[in-house]
Amino acid sequence: MTATSTHTTLLYDGDRHYATEAGGFLRAGLDQGHRGLVMAPASRVEAIRAELGSDADEVTVIDDAVAYGPQWNVYRMLLDFVTAAPGVRSCVIAEQSLAARTPVEIVDYRRLESAASLVFAEQPVDLLCPYDARLPGHLVDIALAAHDGVCEDGSVTPNARFQDPLAVLADLAAVSRPPAYAATLDCSQHAGVALIRGLVRTRGADLGLDRGVLDDLELAVTEVVTNAQLHGSPPVLVHVYDEDETWVWHVQDRGGMPVHPLAGLLPPDEPAEHGYGLWLARQLVAAVDVGRDDTGTHVRLHVRKPA
């Protein structure tokens, strides 16, 4: 049995098409002794259960609101599932409802989908990502850019529109510099961390953010600022501003090291290693942008503002 993964998409045009293709994918895996996992909206889960019948009890189900809340949590859940049974192959369906995602979350989702082919390349997993063919064109484009195969009629055909994941990630790493109206603080010294934590609390409360969201944001900002202090070069600056539907905490340092396209997409072997802070931050906030230009390294943490 090979450990090499597969990462394919399904463009379905209705409930019947979805159930037939997704159910067939899972049943084929179960028949071969593979483990099954579905991370999807409730309506999709029900369609799969109906298609599989009694075999549905063999499949682990996680609601998409949990698996993709925040989006990068899906990587952790997939890793946990795969590593729980060493040597056993997994067939996985991963789909979330994209309708309510903000523009910056959609950008981060494109990053997530493209990186999956690299992050899970050596894992024993067959990953199928269904998309409703009636979605807006820019969302269907994500599907076709991120998957090298398309599932149709129970088989997989090569996808001519597949794009090199590293090239996509490099394109998405372009730096957005802070706007002129941003509030900026110098956090080059360790004492700056306490200042930032307090600012997250007071400003977040003024915005009406939920206590849990503030807890997560405070931890994410602390991790990224601490990373910049330990591994970057001063000054370490924190810019705070609004951008569309999100509140942005933008950490910048003068670090001269290139940023690896996969930085923070997998947990390091040891928590103390460089990169753990980024991995943790991705599990805590709505979206994370990482890039570097001639002004230094930039990490942008996005939190949704209350409606």
Image (cartoon, helix red, strand yellow):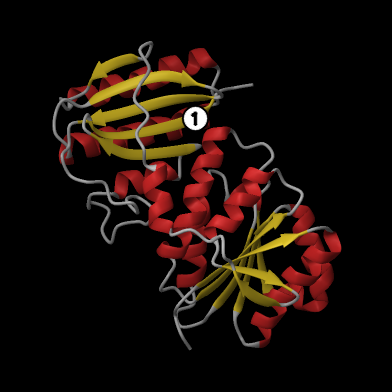
- 209 vs 245, nearest the viewer: 245
Quick check: 202 left or right of 187? right
- 280 vs 147, nearest the viewer: 147
Q: Quadrant of residue 60?
A: bottom right
Say if residue 263 shows up in the picture.
yes
Seen in the picture, residue 124 relative to 62 is either above or below; the reply is below
Say if residue 72 shows up in the picture.
no
Q: Which residue is mark 1?
A: 303
Quick check: 254 left or right of 78? left
Quick check: 285 left or right of 253? right
- 245 vs 161, nearest the viewer: 161
Seen in the picture, residue 109 relative to 3 is either above or below; the reply is above
| Residue 158 percent coordinates (x, y) | 59, 72
Which residue is situated farthest in the front direction here? 160
Which amino acid is tagged 1?
Val
| Residue 191 percent coordinates (x, y) | 19, 23
Seen in the picture, residue 112 relative to 200 is either above or below; the reply is below
| Residue 32 percent coordinates (x, y) | 63, 88
The C terminus sits in image quarter: top right
Determine the residue positioned at 82% across, 71% down: 51
| Residue 55 percent coordinates (x, y) | 76, 78
Seen in the picture, residue 67 relative to 206 is either above or below; the reply is below
Determine the residue positioned at 24% across, 23% down: 237
